[in-house]
Image: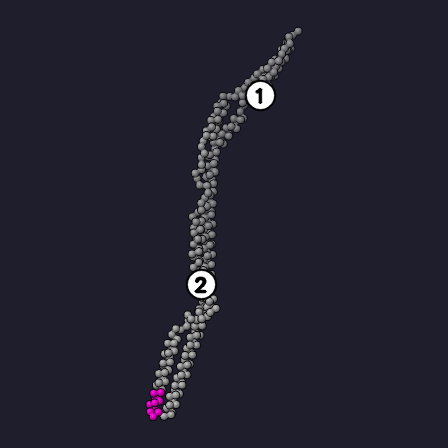
């Protein structure tokens, strides 16, 4: 009879190639360098400032007040004066009353008086005796003189009043029209200034937008450059993860008595080696 056999463990080892070991060490060194590098702040511009056209638009809007306010205030003053002259016509009439009215009346009265005195003197020359007829003629001359003086005074004062009223009404209308024109002019100036400022602002926004796009692109390039070492290390690590690593395998082998057992054990050993090779 053959002697009985036993079970024993066969150990098989595989190791990583030397080139892969060096590659892995280099990855560790690169990771250490990247991890120890200091924080690098971005020194470029992140937010685009207002463009020159936008600043000009702001200044235009600020200056509009000084451009339209004088016309607006003048229009309001003219309209207010026109309304006051309608409420109290004497306010406007006083501006157009002839200040030389009394001088004109006095001059005309003096002319009439002189004419009367001449007629009375002529009457006395024709009738030096001072008859009743001469007295009647002189009395008639004096009456005519007084009538003409009253008529002249009344007509002159009435004419002065009519002229002042007509001119005052015309002045009121002109004030009202001028006030309206000035107010409209102020509004038109404000509208034009606003439109011009809006056009400037639109141009400035396009300029600012282009500058902002350039700033964003530069910052993106900075981030890409800053992260490039990390991306490269990630590629190296990915390649390293796909390489075979070293391993240790223990396979049990049973040995029996006799030739058959020996052959069976040998076959089992070969099968275990084949499995290790496959691993």
Residue 53 in picture, x, y percent from top left: 43, 49
Residue of label 1: 279
The quadrant in which the N terminus is found is top right
Question: Does the magenta segment cover residue 129?
Answer: yes
Observer-nearest of 186 and 154 = 154
Q: Report if residue 181 is visible in the image.
A: no
Q: Residue at x 44, y 45 (%)?
A: 49
The quadrant in which the C terminus is found is top right
Observer-nearest of 102 and 191 = 102
Q: Secondary structure at mark 1?
A: loop
Residue 167 in picture, x, y percent from top left: 43, 71
107 above or below 120?
above
Q: Residue at x 49, y 23 (%)?
A: 21
Q: Report if residue 191 is visible in the image.
A: yes
- The answer to whether marks 1 and 2 mark residues whose Cβ atoms lie closer than 8 Å is no
Q: Is residue 155 left or right of residue 15?
A: left
277 above or below 148?
above
Work out how far the residue at label 1 is from the one at label 2, CA to CA, in angstroms: 105 Å
Residue of label 2: 77
Question: Which quarter of the picture shows residue 248?
Answer: top right
Question: Does the magenta segment cover residue 158?
Answer: no
Q: Is residue 145 left or right of residue 87?
A: left
Q: Which residues are magenta?
A: 120-130
> Which one is earlier in the sequence, the residue at label 1 or at label 2?
2
Residue 110 in picture, x, y percent from top left: 36, 81
Observer-nearest of 23 and 81 = 81
Q: Residue at x 53, y 24 (%)?
A: 243
Q: Secondary structure at mark 2?
A: helix
């Amino acid at each position: 009879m053959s002697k009985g056999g036993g079970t024993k463990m066969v150990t098989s080892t595989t190791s990583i190639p030397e080139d892969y070991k060096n590659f892995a060490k280099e990855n560790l060194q690169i990771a250490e360098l990247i991890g120890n590098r200091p924080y690098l702040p971005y020194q470029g511009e992140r937010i685009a400032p207002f463009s020159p056209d936008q600043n000009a638009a702001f200044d235009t809007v600020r200056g509009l007040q000084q451009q339209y306010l004088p016309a607006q205030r003048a229009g309001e003053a003219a309209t207010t004066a026109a309304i006051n002259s309608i409420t109290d016509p004497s306010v406007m009439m006083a501006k157009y009353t002839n200040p030389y009215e009394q001088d004109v009346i006095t001059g005309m009265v003096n002319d009439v008086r002189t004419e009367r005195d001449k007629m009375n003197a002529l009457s006395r020359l024709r009738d030096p005796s001072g008859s009743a007829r001469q007295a009647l003629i002189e009395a008639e001359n004096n009456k005519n003189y007084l009538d003409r003086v009253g008529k002249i005074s009344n007509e002159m004062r009435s004419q002065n009043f009519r002229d002042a009223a007509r001119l005052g009404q015309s002045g009121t209308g002109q004030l009202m029209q001028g006030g309206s024109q000035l107010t409209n002019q102020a509004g038109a100036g404000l509208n034009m200034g606003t439109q011009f400022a809006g056009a400037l602002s639109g141009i400035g926004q396009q300029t600012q937008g282009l500058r902002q796009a350039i700033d964003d692109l530069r910052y993106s390039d900075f981030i890409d450059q800053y992260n490039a070492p990390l991306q490269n290390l990630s590629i190296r690590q990915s390649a390293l993860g796909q390489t075979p690593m070293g391993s240790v395998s223990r396979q049990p082998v049973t040995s029996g008595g006799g030739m058959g057992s020996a052959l069976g054990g040998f076959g089992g050993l070969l099968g275990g080696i084949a499995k290790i090779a496959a691993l």
